[in-house]
Image (cartoon, rainbow, N blue to C red):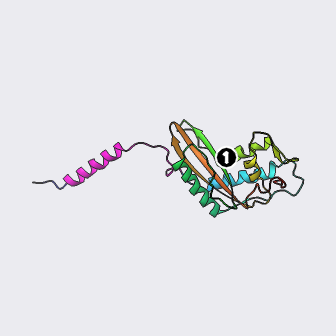
């Protein structure tokens, strides 16, 4: 007599064997992409704190707070996912952007239990460029980058949206942040100061 449990038992063994043989990937773009509400609030607060506190030389009115823009966040998330899927470990600006500013940041670790780079960490890295920026002459120290900082504090920028994704390249676990800004900053920088 044939047992009625043969097929379910065989299916269970095949599924367990298949799952066991799958490669273990603790970090993948699909598993760790996107922002929680707390992530969004943290990165927005970091931007607005910088606009209040990191504007040496500003003699005009205080900079307005940025507002979160879901459209910018969606395109930022899409691009963060693209970078982690196609260029894990390499940051490259989106060449197709028009009329939108973009800041990229990457935090890396070899320890899977280490915390991922936060939005506040990404903003702090961009704002740290302030040390190389001279407001009076509207210049950056030779060989240094200041454009991430000036985008964060660009007076005419009113909206921001960000995305985050994580990938593994070799032993490195990389967290990529993409933030996009509207209206774009760093326009006519020969004659226009950020604030």
Locate residue 74 relative to residue 160 in the image: left or right: left
Nearest the viewer among 86 and 116 is 86
Quarter that holds the N terminus? bottom left
Query: In the rendered view of the protein, which quadrant contains the C terminus?
Result: bottom right
Q: Which residue is mark 1?
A: 122
Residue situated in front as seen by the camera: 173 or 2? 173
Residue 105 x/y as whole percent = 64, 46
Q: Position of residue 133 (x, y in %)?
A: 81, 44
**In which quadrant of the rendered view does residue 187 lie?**
bottom right
Q: Is residue 28 magenta?
A: yes
**Quarter location, residue 163:** bottom right
Residue 122 locus on image (x, y percent): 67, 46
Q: Residues within 10 Å of mark 1 (few under 14, many from 20)?
A: many
- Residue lying at the far left of the rendered structure: 1
For image coordinates 56% across by 50% down, the residue present is: 83
Q: Secondary structure at mark 1?
A: helix
Left or right: where 29 falls relative to 100:
left
Is residue 8 shown above or below 168?
below
Which span of residues is magenta-colored?
A: 5-32
Q: Is residue 97 left or right of residue 154?
A: left
Q: Position of residue 172 (x, y in %)?
A: 54, 38
| Residue 151 located within the stretch drawn in magenta | no
Q: Look at 73% across and 52% down and name the residue there.
A: 47
């Amino acid at each position: 007599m044939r047992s009625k449990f043969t097929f379910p038992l065989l299916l269970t063994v095949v599924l367990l064997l298949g799952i066991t043989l799958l490669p273990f990937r603790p970090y993948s773009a699909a598993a760790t992409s996107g922002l929680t509400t707390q992530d969004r609030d943290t990165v927005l607060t970091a931007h607005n704190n910088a606009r209040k506190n990191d504007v040496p030389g500003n003699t005009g009115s205080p900079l307005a707070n940025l507002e979160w823009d879901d459209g910018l966040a969606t395109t930022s998330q899409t691009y963060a996912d693209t970078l982690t899927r196609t260029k894990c470990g390499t940051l490259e600006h989106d060449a197709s952007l028009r009329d939108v500013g973009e800041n990229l940041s990457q935090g890396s670790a070899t320890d899977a239990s280490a915390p991922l780079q936060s939005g506040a960490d990404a903003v702090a890295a961009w704002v740290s460029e302030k040390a190389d920026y001279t407001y009076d002459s509207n210049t950056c120290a030779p060989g240094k980058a200041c454009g991430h900082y000036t985008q964060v504090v660009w007076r005419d920028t009113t909206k921001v949206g960000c995305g985050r994704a994580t990938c593994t390249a070799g032993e490195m676990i990389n967290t990529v942040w993409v933030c996009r800004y509207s209206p774009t900053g760093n326009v006519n920088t020969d004659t226009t100061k950020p604030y």
